[in-house]
Amino acid sequence: MNSLPSAPLTDGMHLMVDALKRNGVDTIFGVVGIPVTDLARHAQEVGIRYIGFRHEQSAGNAAAVSGYLTQKPGICLTVSAPGFLNGLTALACATQNGFPMIQISGSSDRNIIDLAQGDYEGLDQMNIAKPFVKAAYRINRPEDIAVGVARAIRAAVSGRPGGVYLDITTAMLSTTMDAEAAEATLFTPVDPAPKQYPCSGSVKRALKLLASAKKPLIILGKGAAYAQAEEQVRTFVESTGIPFLPMSMAKGLLPDDHPQCAASARSLVLGQADVVMLIGARLNWLLTHGKGKKWNPAVQFVQLDIEPEEMDSNRPIAAPVVGDIVSSLEVMIAKMDNFSIHCPQEWLDAIDATRKVNMAKMQVKLTTVTSPMNYFGALRAVNDVMQGYKDIYLVNEGANTLDDTRNVINMYHPRLRLDTGTWGVMGIGMGYAIGAAVTGGKQVLAIEGDSAFGFSGMEIETICRYQLPVTIVVFNNDGIYRGNDPNLSGGPDPSPTSLTPGARYDKMIEAFGGVAYHATTTGELRNALSAALASRKPSLINCVIDPAVGTESGHIGNLNPKSVVGSLQK
Ligand code: ADP
Ligand code: TPW
Ligand code: MG
């Protein structure tokens, strides 16, 4: 008997890759193993770039930053249970930061997991992910792949962006389906991050309040940077004449040397402003919740945000404007002429006077030569070299290393400064550097505290393997905040904040074929950094910093709990 020729089949794994490709995914960041190895191989086969990491947290951070830079969800691929959990920190962090990201994780057999029978890497992943993400979905059947991917994309990029967990079961990956029927399920979601215009009443209320201000201030946050609102922000800032203060990752949205930039008069403007317009910035801990001694108690807020629930989260918001930032500013600019918004000259003069005093103080710090180097001496050398590299990414983490770098290194273009963000998390360094280099195509300078670097340091192998143009400067002060703390028991163990004295982080990159530099003076640092950036090669500069000069927790030492029996901090 002749059997009929059977229809061609596909399976969940192939269809998953087809769906990602159809949705414009061009890069996957991950670590492979059971059950996703073939998925990564097939993705590479069909032209999706696969970047393999040494730890899922860094792969996740790379995906998150690529989401921030492109407004498309960055994709992180992980194996079941431990790989999933390693990636989850980055996914949670992306959610906190409002970066669109999808973690796709293989998962084990539902029947065994649900009866707690001990499967290989068995874990109830989707339920564990839920509290940490914007949305979590599981795809159990190949015919649901297209919908699952579409839902994940929409959830990641619409409204306030965030992290999405997408669970793909081992059984689903090997389930077969008629290839033609499978192809017919594929689609791309229409307009996944629609424009959201604010209502006109909210815009009028906001403009009226701004027009009444004697000491107005605009605070730019990373939401405005994510929204790519630089053109509208510039028009609004320059045509109102209102001074602006950039939050850390909003630096460069307008250049830091813009005449209206009030960054070097931060305490003055926060302490005195009577109307503050927040553009994509939350009144969270980074702005001391909009209250307390740093703020004018009578301050009133205008807030532009896409997330309605953000309003009044910490302080009453007098004029909430709910919408996407680009559309909201466009409407405000169009209506601005009906309100005479202006910035009183006395306010600008006061800011200018303070700015001059603070800049002169900073100049003294930067030009004082010490041996060993302190942070400011080292940063002066970095800043000199950066004048020739204003258009590269600057990744930054640490405590003193973070705060002092933020204050010294000006940014001139949007979305180039990538740092510890809303959680102040250590470990983003190498993941962000790799994600930015791969996605943005520009070279990267990462300025890393020695402790901060350690969290993702093994990824220098990844940087070398893919020959990425990443230069890492490790500010090596032998420890967390400081390298010279004593063990209070007098015993032989190092103190809780100590790391290996005199460690040579530069030697690490030699092992993988990268270029190593060791700098003990500002001159050596300047030469090393110039050579490293000019070469565009994977490179690491071990920069020796005085172990005694760091302050506890950098600029946020006040957040440490106070002890009734006195402080143990030096
Ligand atoms: P920063 O840390 O720089 O102060 P936050 O992360 O606290 O900034 O705040 C960013 C805010 O921007 C979030 O409340 C988020 O909802 C908002 N946001 C993100 N994207 C957009 C957008 N396209 N339009 C409007 N608001 C946005
Ligand atoms: C995931 C706590 C905040 S800053 C820091 C740690 C460990 C390192 C500071 O030392 P570093 O910088 O990097 O050498 P410097 O210049 O001050 O010496 N775990 C996580 N996140 C945070 N924030 C911590 C711990 C922390
Ligand atoms: Mg340190």
Image (spheres, rainbow, N blue to C red):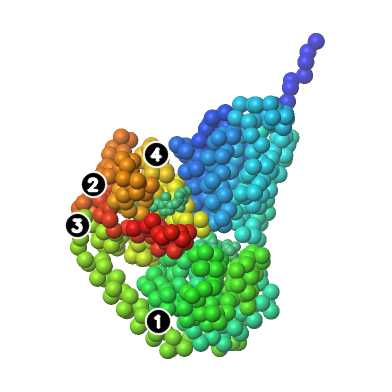
Residue lying at 45% horizontally and 36% vertically, measured from the top left: 54
Which residue type does callout 2 highlight? His
Q: Does 50 sit left or right of 570 as displayed?
A: right
Q: Are marks 2 and 3 in contact (CB under 8 Å)?
A: no
In the picture of the structure, the residue carrying the numbered disc 3 is: 371
- From this viewpoint, is residue 271 visible? yes
| Residue 329, x across and y down, in percent | 57, 73
Marks 1 and 3 sit apart, C-alpha to C-alpha, by 35 Å
Residue 245: give its label: none
Q: Quadrant of residue 391?
A: bottom left
Q: Quadrant of residue 5?
A: top right
| Residue 491, x across and y down, in percent | 32, 42
How many residues crowd around disc 1 within 10 Å: few (fewer than 14), some, or many (20 or more)? many
Earlier sequence position, callout 2 versus callout 1: 1
Residue lying at 43% horizontally and 59% vertically, measured from the top left: 565
Where disc 3 sits, the SS reads: loop
Residue 351: give its label: 1
User: From the viewer's perspective, is the residue at label 3 or at label 4 nearer?
Assistant: 3
- From this viewpoint, is residue 275 visible? no
Where disc 4 sits, the SS reads: helix
In the picture of the structure, the residue carrying the numbered disc 2 is: 518
Marks 3 and 4 sit apart, C-alpha to C-alpha, by 30 Å
Earlier sequence position, callout 1 versus callout 3: 1
In the picture of the structure, the residue carrying the numbered disc 4 is: 458
Residue lying at 44% horizontally and 56% vertically, measured from the top left: 419
User: From the viewer's perspective, is the residue at label 2 or at label 3 nearer?
Assistant: 3
How many residues crowd around disc 2 within 10 Å: few (fewer than 14), some, or many (20 or more)? some
Task: Determine whether the beta carbon of the residue marked 1 sits less than 8 angstroms from the nearest atom of ligand 1.
Answer: no
Where disc 1 sits, the SS reads: helix
